[in-house]
Image (cartoon, rainbow, N blue to C red):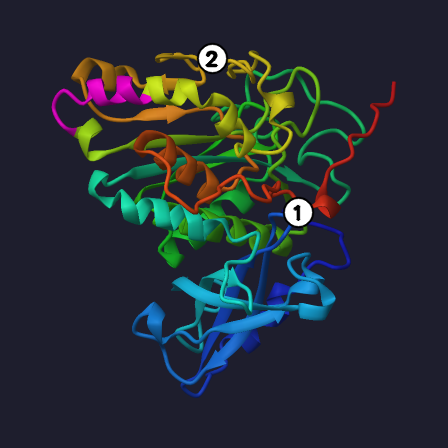
Amino acid sequence: MASDDKFLSNTANLQKYLSLPQKGSVIAEYVWIDASGGTRSKCKTLKQSPSSVKDLPEWNFDGSSTGQAPGDNSDVYLRPVAYYPDPFRTEGGANILVMCETWMSDGKPNAYNFRHDAAVLMDKHAKHEFWFGLEQEYTLLDAMGWPYGWPKNGFPAPQGPYYCGNGTGKVFGRDIVDAHYKACMYAGINISGTNAEVMPGQWEYQVGPCTGIDLGDQLWMSRFLLHRIAEEFGAKVTFSPKPIPGDWNGAGLHTNVSTTEMRADGGIKAIEAAMEKLSKRHAEHMKVYGEGNEARMTGKHETASYDKFSWGVANRGASVRVNRSCAEEGKGYFEDRRPASNADPYQITGMIVETLCGKVEGVDLYANTVNVENVENEMVVPVAKP
């Protein structure tokens, strides 16, 4: 995919430097989540490769520049929780990407550290062995913020040929998608598939199944990788749940959930019990299921109503769908179709564990809920010219 953006990275010139030896040192890029639900990162040189996450030093950053701390107490600390091989710096050394939690100087989690509370819940209820698989939908945009492949200031043909499509005029941005796919595999992200979505320029990839908090770590790192790769192609990524108003599909983060009880023979009873619990806390879930989700969940375009809970077998118009094969086998998993594409996976999975297993004292998953779409990257829809 070509771009005439003068700010596009010149990867060809970069290659000769990437291949230079690092004399035994390791580049560790620390990644964290900011106050707007975007990812930030900075690099640190290590003198040797870590053998575990415990070998990675704590670091810090200026929280007043990311909306995470006031100027008079700006230090926010980065505590590594997971690390992955770096697909951008594969030559010259065993470089890594480091997923971090954010903490304050008083020893408390930063207000935007949603991972901490989710991990507390999952540790407490580890005996249920929650498996999660999330389906991340997103839309590729050009430098002007218009969906890739769409006529400038205009609209393509109606939806129909684009979902899982092949061929010019049906799919847009496959090179970015394939690059992201391979980068996730190299990094050890458990990416299980990808496909073109219903709206042209919209794509989906799936991460999982992963156990417990590991899903949130991997999905956030996969989002970081997607933004970094799109940067090299001169493209933008939006996780907005309804990037184009009108008769176009929105973007979700469908969440597949399974426990030991659901996977056992007769597990359909545990799935049905989960539906009862989910129905009683629908409003609480919607609070953390993404910003702007009302525009997506209209009851049309394969969504349920925003303010009503429903579930059914093989029903993509329900809040929660039970796969037909699971219903026939009497065990398996369920798919929560309510989360928007910009929702925080830590809050989604933590809320599900909280609802199915009961609350944990001192945990507040609602605090400082944010949209993962950085405000400066919000898309402005131009009016089509006649």
Residue 75 numbered tag: none
Q: Quadrant of residue 93?
A: bottom left
Magenta residues, start to end: 264-274
Residue 206 higher or lower than 65, as above or below: above
Residue 82, magenta (yes or no): no
Q: Amino acid at mark 2?
A: Gly
Residue at point 37%, 46% (across, down): 215
Which residue position is annotated with label 2?
317
Q: Residue at x 66, y 61 (%)?
A: 69
Instruction: Compare residues 247 and 306 and report the one nearer the observer.
Output: 306
Find residue 379 and report its image quarter. top right
Circle 1 — which element?
Answer: loop
Q: Which residue is mark 1?
A: 235
Would you say the residues marked 1 and 2 are in contact, meaning their CB atoms lie under 8 Å apart?
no
Task: Give above or below for 308 relative to 105.
Answer: above
In this rendering, the answer to whether 356 lies above or below 223 is above
Secondary structure type for disc 2 = loop
Residue 144 on image: x %, y %: 77, 42
